[in-house]
Image: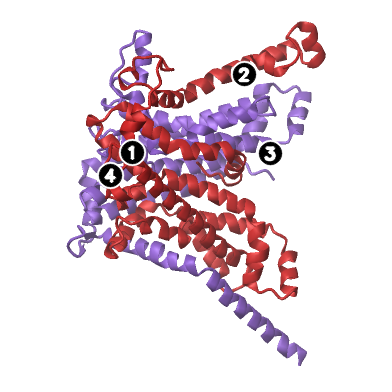
Amino acid sequence: MTTQTVTPTAPPTGAAAASTTRRRPRRRGRSVARHAGLGVFVAFMLYPLVWMVTSAFTPESEILTGPLIPEEFTLENFINGWNSLTRPFWVFYGNSFVVTISSIVGNLFSCSLTAYALARLTFKARNVYFGIVLVSVMLPMHVLVIPQYIIFSQFDLVNTFVPLVLPKFLATDAFFIFLMVQFIRGIPRELDQAAAIDGAGPFRTFWYVIFPLMRPALVTTTIFTFIWTWNDFFTPLIYLTDQSVFTVPVALSSMVDAESNSGIGMLLAMSVLSLIPIMLFFAFAQKYLIRGITTTGLKG
Amino acid sequence: MATATTPSRRKSRLNRQGRAAHVFMLPWLVGLVGITAVPTLASLYLAFTDYNVLSTPEFIGLANFERMFADERFWQSVRVTLTYVLVSVPLQLAFALLLALILDRGMRGLTFYRSAFYLPSLLGSSVAVAVLWRELFGHSGLVNSALALVGIEGSSWLQNPQTALGTLVVLNVWTFGSPMVIFLAGLRQIPEELYESARVDGASVLRQFGSITVPLLTPIIFFNLILQTIGAFQAFTQAHVVSGGSGGPVDSTLFYTLYIYQQGFTAFDMGYASALAWVLLVFIGVMTAGHFLLSKYWVFYGD
């Protein structure tokens, strides 16, 4: 199989191979071995995920005993899982989307405004502010979560999405400010000056010049906010206790807690469903994702 | 006359920019005060109090920290977390580096392999994958079914306190893809000429690795080390889902963050939980500073 990918049109006979690729046989042998080794390793790494997907379509009784690809596909696990909590699963899906999309909008809005001020406007104590941004990047959330919980519960906001979304509109993901400041510093200042000569103030310069040019940084922010918020478990676990406001991860986790009267099949089926948006992102935004990691070092 | 107006005009422009800057930063400033600074100070204060949400916080000095010293579960959570960090992070980085080296230099199918190895990192922190891990390592899970094929009778990995933490280590190592992607980018920065001249000088592949690749990659290794260590210290989801929130069996997966959660949001002992959180903050801070100090001796920043 590997030789075919090396020379797709020519049959892998000695003469044809030698005429299309001028590799020495030993090197070529090594390359085949490398692909074979990597292929086995990829299969090993991804096997659990493949098993999860096929098991989701396998009848409950055959999941651990039957072959990897079930003889008979069933949607029973999805149907059972969909209605296993007091609300149908689409409620949690909807909640997750509301929270995720609001968080993206919040981060794009608040972080870009702050970053523009810190990168371009001249004012007293600018460096102090920038230092605060850097320090708050490193502050672990566990230190903040208890007082934040107390504050939000005083305002009776437990079991709403406000504690999950409001912080994003207030630029508490300081990392993205840092990312955007670095990006804006790379945009030529002549553009700002040209806008200023045309009579644009800071607001119009930001909105018509800088913001459109920030696209790569905005894309990175969108991708990572999406993945982090969609996967986030800790914050919704603390603030959301009523099933009607559950996001997908909390719903899944509460299905696990009730596992005694549910089955593996439906848990895996709902797990697969919960990963679909991330997988779609992976399929369509992969280029930006990889670029995002290599430029920022962020983990998915 | 002109010299007199210029500075004042400049000053007024500065003032205008300063005002505009504060308007731009308004959301962040509000968040900084309300969501970051005040809670940080509040949590520092709560760490010295006895507070269970219903009553008002009562100042008790260092009692929470004294209690920690005598708290067997606190020490257990420290042991579990340190074991997890010290075992899984080096293993994860070793895998990441090894695979990055194998994949380096424009090989065929690079993008495919990179994506395939990266996928677990993307999904690794989700509840869904933690659920999957439960089913893989459960008593009648996939791992035991596979072992049964070769005639080994596996134990119940998650119910056995000897192995439960191991399954979470495996999960973290499984997500080596994101440091690998960073390593790949780092390897591409190393100029090909260095290897060429090393080959001309007759240096072996191993020698090239030891004298070119590793030294030039140390900043990236350091970066990954800091990032993954801080991340591992704050791991929560996997332990919570796999153990059903208990940190069991027999506290063998009681991650530090899970213990904070239990104290703060199950027992509602928020004073003690705040004290625990501050110990974590100080510990991460000291450790990161230590890494930076030590980095002088092994990280190579070129000239």
Count of numbered labels shown in the rendering: 4
Secondary structure at numbered mark 2: helix
Q: Nearer the viewer, residue A123 or A196?
A: A196
Chain under callout 4: B
* First in residue order: circle 1 vs circle 2: 2
Residue pointed to by mark 1: A252
Q: Residues under labels 1 and 2: Cα distance?
A: 37 Å
The outermost residue toward the left is B55
Q: Residues within 10 Å of mark 4 (few under 14, many from 20)?
A: many
Q: Colour of chain A?
A: red
Q: Which residue is mark 3?
A: B189
Mark 4–mark 1 distance (CA, rounded to whole Å): 21 Å
Secondary element at tag 1:
helix
A57 lies left or right of A281: left
Colour-to-chain, purple: B
Pointer 4: what residue?
A: B259
Q: Nearer the viewer, mark 4 or mark 1?
A: 1
Of the residues shown, which amino acid type is indicated by label 2?
His
Q: Which residue is mark 2?
A: A35
Give the percent coordinates (x, y) of residue A133. Answer: 51, 60
Q: Residue at x 22, y 41 (%)?
A: B72
Q: Chain of mark 2?
A: A
Q: What quarter of the picture does the N terminus of chain B occupy?
A: bottom right
Q: Earlier in the sequence, mark 3 or mark 4?
A: 3
Q: Of the residues tagged 3 and 1, which is closer to the observer?
A: 1
User: In front of the other: label 3 or label 2?
Assistant: 2
Label 1 Cα neighbours within 10 Å, binned few <14 / some 14-19 / many ≥20: many
Question: Disc 3 sits on a residue from what chain?
Answer: B
